[in-house]
């Protein structure tokens, strides 16, 4: 049964898209001498992010909400990360850009659009405004994890203080320096 997004209910990826992605992955690995990636996963939780490469585990996870074109481009992008290997400093640096171009995808760090078939954002979702105790830089988060700090000030001085809570628009306005 199809849902309103054209995807089967629950965000299941159409079998055709799965087959084409797997086939493309195998062809690219063989053509470019990349160690075959045995694990290609699809996630319905990835509603804003298109994909992710887990270099150590040699696996790729794609959003279940991608259209066919996004799936192919994202697969190429993530495979470039696998080809480069671990690169904590500059994951989208010159080596990655060269691999991305070689694999046939525009070498850009961020996607131009969210997953095509992702469900709309819930308007009432709570956002939190955090402020650096040292420099005053403001951050917006939906989830506040323990141990967050301002990278510029470091973990000792840059403790983030919960300063504001509210809807997305209000907190983003606050973060830009205007009163909510």
Image (cartoon, rainbow, N blue to C red):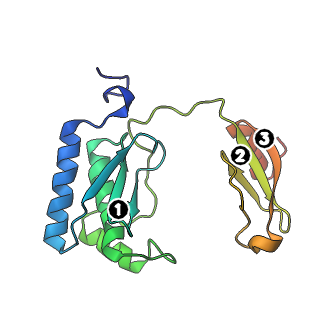
Whether residue 174 sits left or right of residue 23 in the image: it is: right
The crowding category of the residue bearing disc 2, from other C-alpha atoms within 10 Å (few below 14, some 14 to 19, many at least 20), is many
- Tell me the element at label 1: helix
Numbered label attached to residue 172: 2
Place residue 97 in its image quadrant: bottom left
- Tell me the element at label 2: helix
Place residue 107 in its image quadrant: bottom left
Numbered label attached to residue 78: 1
The image shows residue 167 at horizontal and vertical percentages of: 71, 35
Q: Nearer the viewer, residue 10 or 171?
A: 10
Nearer mark to the viewer, of 1 and 2: 1
The image shows residue 152 at horizontal and vertical percentages of: 73, 73
Numbered label attached to residue 165: 3
The image shows residue 88 at horizontal and vertical percentages of: 50, 75
The crowding category of the residue bearing disc 3, from other C-alpha atoms within 10 Å (few below 14, some 14 to 19, many at least 20), is some
Mark found first going from the N terminus, 2 or 3? 3
31 is higher (above) or lower (below) than 146: below
The crowding category of the residue bearing disc 1, from other C-alpha atoms within 10 Å (few below 14, some 14 to 19, many at least 20), is many
């Amino acid at each position: 049964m199809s849902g309103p997004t054209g995807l089967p209910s629950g965000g299941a990826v159409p079998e055709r898209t799965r087959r084409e992605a797997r086939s493309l992955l195998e062809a690219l690995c063989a053509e470019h001498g990349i160690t075959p990636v045995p694990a290609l996963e699809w996630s319905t939780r990835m509603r804003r992010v298109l994909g992710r490469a887990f270099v150590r585990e040699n696996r790729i996870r794609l959003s279940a909400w991608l259209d066919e074109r996004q799936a192919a481009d994202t697969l190429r992008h993530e495979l470039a990360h696998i080809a480069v290997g671990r690169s904590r400093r500059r994951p989208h640096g010159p080596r990655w850009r060269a691999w991305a171009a070689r694999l046939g995808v525009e070498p850009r760090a961020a996607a131009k659009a969210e997953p095509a078939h992702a469900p709309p954002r819930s308007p009432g979702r709570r956002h939190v405004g955090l402020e650096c105790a040292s420099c005053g830089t403001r951050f917006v988060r939906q989830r506040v994890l323990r141990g967050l700090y301002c990278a510029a000030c470091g973990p000792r001085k840059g403790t983030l203080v919960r300063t504001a809570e509210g809807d997305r628009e209000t907190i983003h306005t606050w973060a830009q320096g205007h009163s909510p």
